[in-house]
Amino acid sequence: MSASTLNASGTTERSGGKVFNSFCVACHLHGVAGAPKLGNSADWLPRKEKGMPTLLKHAIEGLNAMPPKGMCSNCSDDEIQAAIQFMLDNS
């Protein structure tokens, strides 16, 4: 998915990297409140094993200290999934 992809409402979708750097970075860079850290494969492996559907559900609904959509209330589900994939690809 690129930064120029249009979503169903006709607005431009943000890339996973852009969503991460705008929202997710606050917790996932340093592991705030137990968040898996970007670049730490040991943090991500047990989550990766649960599969994308579970990761996406947890990210959209919130889990433990993480609020729904990680504070990106205007992110589409596709943008949330792209951010998750960005973190998986970089861990």
Image (cartoon, rainbow, N blue to C red):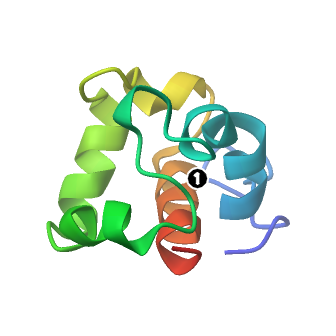
* Furthest residue toward left: 50
The percent position of residue 30, horizontal first and vertical second, equals: 59, 41
Relative height, residue 36 to residue 74 (above, below):
below
Relative height, residue 6 to residue 58 (above, below):
below
Relative height, residue 19 to residue 34 (above, below):
below
Which residue is more in the foreground, 35 or 54? 35
Q: Amino acid at mark 1?
A: Glu
Report the residue at 41% width, 40% height from top.
35
Within 10 Å of disc 1 (Cα), the crowding (few <14, some 14-19, many 20+) is many
Report the residue at 63% width, 28% height from top.
74
Q: Quadrant of residue 43?
A: bottom left
Residue at disc 1, secondary structure: helix
Q: Is residue 20 left or right of residue 2?
A: left
Res 10 seen here: no
In this rendering, the count of numbered labels is: 1
Q: Is residue 63 left or right of residue 30?
A: left
Q: Mark 1 — residue?
A: 79
* Furthest residue toward right: 4
* Furthest residue toward bottom: 89
Q: Quadrant of the N terminus?
A: bottom right
Q: Is residue 8 left or right of residue 65?
A: right
Res 68 seen here: yes
Q: Quadrant of residue 15?
A: bottom right
Report the residue at 36% width, 35% height from top.
34
Report the residue at 73% width, 54% height from top.
13
The percent position of residue 51, horizontal first and vertical second, equals: 20, 70
The percent position of residue 49, horizontal first and vertical second, equals: 17, 74
Q: Is residue 62 left or right of residue 89?
A: left
